[in-house]
Amino acid sequence: MKKLFFILMLLYPLSSLFGLIIYRPYNNGDMNEIRCYLKVTDENDNDVLKTNCKVFYAWYDEPNVFYSYKKTVFIAGGMATHIYFTPGKYKISVYTPKDKQNNFECNNKETWTSNTFIYDTNNPLKVIFITPTADDNVFYNGGWFISYKAPKFYKFTKPVIISSRKND
């Protein structure tokens, strides 16, 4: 009984927060090992990841086992990050610095970045997805895409095609 009370007391602060799952499905091959790092800012572009959020992660194949991040909040292929916000609007993005790309072969040798996703805690949205981007030939091109829509899947997540062609 004491253990149950203790667990409830630990979880009580999370009950007043708004939860969102940021899911990065499995990717193809070595792309799974490349981490994308989470950035959360408020409407004034202040970094609030450590001040307004509580963050945990789970692996796809162990969805009910949660882990605490020790330092940096990252997401690899097959991970779901559970983030709890205080009420408000937030800008969510991910990036991979060039020194963390594990010498992955693609055209973009600079920092890989994503689009910015606006999350309002008043919105009933519960899950967003992170997918690598690819060129017109479906080769990874060093970028990330965040969406509320689940990515297409066939054995692994299909990348989001970012066309390099201008309107013909």
Image (tube, grey):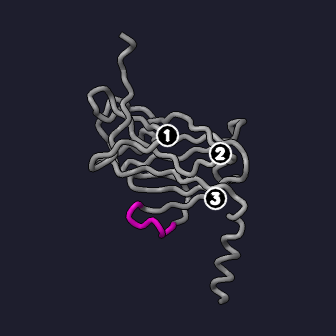
Is 78 situated left or right of 91 in this image?
Answer: left
Q: Mark 2 belongs to which amino acid?
A: Asn
Tell me the number on the disc at residue 147: 1
Going from N to C along the chain, the mark reached first, 1 or 3, is 3
Q: Position of residue 53 (x, y in %)?
A: 66, 54
- The answer to if 110 sits in the magenta stretch is no
> In this rendering, which labeled residue sits more in front, label 3 or label 2?
2
Secondary-structure class at tag 3: strand
> In this rendering, which labeled residue sits more in front, label 1 or label 2?
2
Quadrant in which residue 116 is drawn: top right
Nearer to me, 63 or 109: 63
Q: Which residues are magenta?
A: 60-66
- What residue appears at the point 62 percent right and 42 percent down from the top-left corner? 119
Q: Badge 3 local density, few (<14 within 10 Å), some, or many (20+)?
A: some
- What residue appears at the point 45 percent right and 35 percent down from the top-left corner? 111
Quadrant in which residue 1 is drawn: bottom right
Q: Position of residue 85 (x, y in %)?
A: 67, 53
Is 82 situated left or right of 60 in this image?
Answer: right
Query: Disc 1 versus disc 2: distance between alpha carbons?
Result: 15 Å
Query: Disc 3 versus disc 2: distance between alpha carbons?
Result: 18 Å
Residue under pointer 2: 123
Q: Badge 2 local density, few (<14 within 10 Å), some, or many (20+)?
A: few
Q: Mark 3 belongs to which amino acid?
A: Lys
Q: Position of residue 72 (x, y in %)?
A: 54, 54
Tell me the number on the disc at residue 54: 3
Is 8 situated left or right of 21 in this image?
Answer: right
Is the magenta region chiefly helix, strand or loop? strand
Q: Residue furthest top?
A: 168
